[in-house]
Image: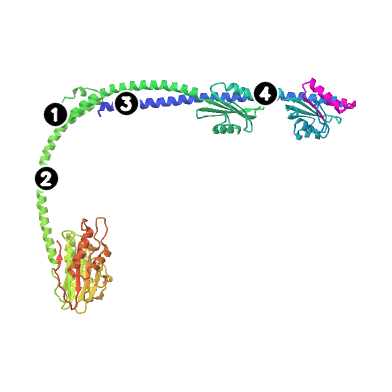
Amino acid sequence: MRLRTRLVLMVGVSVSVGVVAVAAVLGFLAWRSILAQAEAEGLAIARLLAQSATVSEQVVAEVGALLDREMIAQGVLAGQLADAALQSGMGRASLGRLLAEIAARSSIGELWIADGEGRVRAGSADDADVAARVTEATGLPDAALAGLLAGTRFAEPLGIGRQPLGGMPMRYVGVRNSEQAPVVVVGREQAPLGRLSQTMGVQRLLDALVRDRTVAALWVFGPDGHTVASTGGATPSPRETQLVTSVLGGGPARAALSGGWIDVAAAMPDQYGVPAGVALARLSTVALDTLFASYLRAGGATALGVLLVGILLSVVMGRRIAAPMMRIADAAGAVDTRSFVPGALATVTARRDELGYLARTFEVMAEQVFAREEDLERQVRQRTAELQLRNDQLDAARRRLEADLELARLLQSTILPQAFPTDRHWSGTACMTPAQQMAGDFYDYFPLDAHRLGLVIADVSGKGIAPAFFMAVSRSALQEAARRNDDPGVCLAVANDRLCEQNPLDMFVTVFYAIIDERNGTVMYANGGHNRPYVVADDGPPRAIPLTDGVMLGVMPDMPYASGILTLRPGETLFLYTDGVSEAMNLRSEKFGEVRLEAVLTQAAALPVDAMLEAVTDAVRDFAGAAPQSDDITCLVVRYLGDRIEYAPRMTVDA
């Protein structure tokens, strides 16, 4: 992608991101402003509804209180009239007709005279039962007259009851009178007050407000949360119910946006400012959505215009910036092909901005590059000739070193014994396969007298030339000590002291030394930190020789070494090996181990010694597979024959 295109894309993307971000922020702010305005209007409607409902309820309540006071006054007058009539000797039937006439000529709906126990003595109704209680005639509860009958109340609104025959709701008050007429109950129809409540009450106000398209539903709730009035038979949602509960609990007016509606709840205070209920309004957001969509269209058109102008400016500026850069890039390509001509960037170097400074610096750099290339070519030719001379010298030194190592390997292989001593009482074989050109392992056997044979297997620490030389020193020390001492432990102690004196590199060697006697198969042995050899019989699994106390040779002088003794039966084999056998590893870093070695020895127990040795080395080689040999592999196999005769093979040392 060209630089100019990248500049145009970068500026275009930057302008686009900025415009979109600003438009999004402005749109969000516009939406929040519109929503806040709608919530404010909703709260105003709810508060207006709350105030209007409160005023309507207060007016109806005040009218009811005035009516109660008027009825109390009528009850007092009716009581006085009843006293006068009863004192004049008027009967109860005549008194009832008098009360009915008073009710017919006035606004009083019913008049009842009760005795001290609440039973009817006279009433305005034609079918008044003088044996019944007033509460049965009016439909009031017995508790309504309790205060009047007890004498604790002298005038009291009794509540709403129903006339038994007409069934119309009546509003009753009671008055405590004289002994002639103890209780006077006055009733008036509740219908006019109900019509007043409907004319000025909450329901009419709700019906008027809901005609506005923005008002979807209105509710008025009492102080206990029950619905007092509502519109359209709508049911509040759980979210709206939660708002009402919050306001009833003493919270402020609340508004919430949910499901395309704005829900607003406000408390309705009574004449004393105490919340007497809650008004809830559900407002539609259609008008808000329409207004917000118009804002979005206007903002989107403005953002698109700004974006197009920004892209046009980015194209123009990209061309002005990219043209000099392309000239410098072409000049860089000319420098690479060595076709650059000084002065080719004259129009760019004349500029006084960063591009001009870059072009001037580039011309100076190009001249220096040409000069340095010539100097480097000269130095390369000189260093190439010197390097070739050094390589020839290194090749000659490598060939001499390889020849010396090969000679050393041959010499080391000749140091080890090549043929096992011929004797009818035993047969033996051995092999040594070095991990590198020079090995640190070695085996040895030498006659001590006409009946005894010394056997040695050892492993020098490390691999390479130094262990190979230390191997020769160790072999000489062991042979010299063996010929002077008949006890294997003493032999290892003498050899250890000598090696400690001749060990400038602090190397060490593990050794197993044994003396086998052909006359009775007795084997005396001592172990200096070496692997335990095995006694292999053809009638059972191989047995590891018990260890004797003894550390590696060459570590510390004056160390004691104990000796052990065992007896071989005719046909039993002594198998000696180094850790290159048991610690041989395959590509999965698994070791050959002593368990596999014992299994191979068990299978090869009846084979001749050379076949047994070949079986072990083949098993180790097959186990390792393609993995490189990690250590020298050395084995020494000796079978005690007694009076039997068995072929004694020669030793092998692998190159």
- Label for residue 197? 4
Tag 3, which secondary structure? helix
Tag 4, which secondary structure? helix
Q: Which of marks 2 and 4 is nearer the N terminus?
A: 4
Task: Tell me the distance, in whole angstroms, between the alpha carbons under discs 1 and 3.
Answer: 35 Å
Which residue appears at 27% of the width and 65% of the height? Answer: 594
Tag 2, which secondary structure? helix
Which residue appears at 26% of the width and 56% of the height? Answer: 589
Location of the C terminus by quadrant is bottom left
What's the residue type where badge 1 is placed? Ser
Which corner quadrant of the image does residue 454 belong to? bottom left
- Label for residue 11? 3
Residue 479 drawn at (x, y percent): 17, 71
Pointer 1 local density, CA inside 10 Å: few below 14, some 14–19, many at least 20: few
- Label for residue 339? 1
Tag 1, which secondary structure? loop
Task: Look at discs 1 and 4 and give the one toward the viewer.
Answer: 4
Residue on which disc 2 sits: 387
Instruction: Please tell me whether residue 267 belongs to the stretch shown in magenta.
Output: no
Which corner quadrant of the image does residue 635 belong to? bottom left
Location of the N terminus by quadrant is top left
For the record, the magenta segment spans 84-113
Task: Tell me the distance, in whole angstroms, between the alpha carbons under discs 4 and 3.
Answer: 71 Å
What's the residue type where badge 3 is placed? Val
Left or right of residue 292, residue 1 in this image: left
Task: Tell me the distance, in whole angstroms, between the alpha carbons under discs 2 and 3.
Answer: 55 Å
Task: Tell me the distance, in whole angstroms, between the alpha carbons under discs 2 and 4.
Answer: 118 Å
